[in-house]
Image: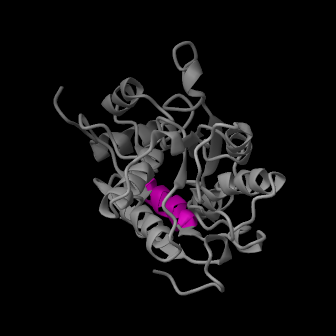
Amino acid sequence: MGELRYTPHAAARQLATRKTHAVGLLLNNLRNDFFIPFLTGVEGIVRKKGYNLIIATYLADSRDTTPPPIGPHNTDGMLVFSDGLDEETLVRFQSTGFPMVLVHSTPPPSLSIPSVTVENVEITRRLIEHLIHVHHRRRILFLRGPIHQEDSSLREAGYRAALEASGIPFDERLMLTGGFERGIAYEALSEFLSNGDRVEFDAVFTGSDDAAIGVFRALQQHDIQIPEEVSVAGFDDLGFAHYLDPPLSTVRAPTESVGSIATERLFRLLEGETADGTVVLPTEIILRRSCGCKLEQPTL
């Protein structure tokens, strides 16, 4: 299949004929504190442009039988979060000139759709290496996010790269599914801790701050001290991270900026301009007591 590209003038013509003055945001769920700053960024631009925002969730396991709840039939353009649409639907929507911007994912090789995401691999590698070389952790439990999400696979790549660079063999038994959600992370780690044959570990990288809440609860219920016995680190630096006990070491991601920049790019398409390529926003490490650092420190 040849590469499909947007035709901005066609998109502008569609807008002129529809005039719904609404843009869509397609998510896989709204159960996570992560979405508060993200939606703030999106809504600020939408309001500035005088449009309405339609938000819908669309579950991967319903895609074979249920069409997307938002799309060309009720919006002028759409933000697609993570794995919100499969490649077949992306191809179909783009072939009509429907403006889309992908968020926290990059387009399939066959498509040219603008996207906005954050740096995942290098920052995760550096955080894991901090646990290894500063706090002498070598048995680091990794909680995967959703299996089909790009952020999850890239953070796992950073984790594996840190182990390899430090001469630590990868151990599949130290991989759990945390789903980027506190409830899933809590259940996964609780089950792991209740297994009398479990392997030893001395740190947990949760993959998201929301999952870290579940990790904290599971460790505390099993009387495991953070960070004296087990270091914990997250990803996102959500508003509550500083207030956990102990405060959470994490990766600070510009989540609100992801929302605003993605929405700005969508409106560029709506206005007949181009917005090709992928924007990768920088991330930084915030060190707090949960990893073993005594006080909050400057970023790495």
Query: What main secondary structure does the magenta stretch of the protein show?
Result: helix
Q: Nearer the viewer, residue 60 or 178?
A: 178
Residue 148 image point, x, y percent: 46, 35
The residue positioned farthest toward the left in the image shown: 2
Q: Residue at x 48, y 61 (%)?
A: 138
Residue 242 image point, x, y percent: 71, 74
Q: Nearer the viewer, residue 218 or 178?
A: 218
Report the quarter where the N terminus lies: top left
What segment carries the magenta color?
A: 253-267
- Quarter of the view holding residue 183: top right
The residue positioned farthest toward the front in the image shown: 197
Residue 266 magenta-highlighted:
yes
Report the quarter where the C terminus lies: bottom left
Residue 271, can we see it? no
Residue 241, can we see it? yes
Q: From the viewer's perspective, is residue 90 above or below residue 40?
A: above
- Count numbered badges in the picture: 0
Residue 268 image point, x, y percent: 39, 57
Q: Residue at x 67, y 46 (%)?
A: 181
Residue 11 magenta-highlighted:
no
Q: From the viewer's perspective, is residue 163 above or below residue 87?
A: below
Q: Report the colour scheme.
A: one colour
Q: Nearer the viewer, residue 296 or 32?
A: 296
Residue 248 image point, x, y percent: 67, 69
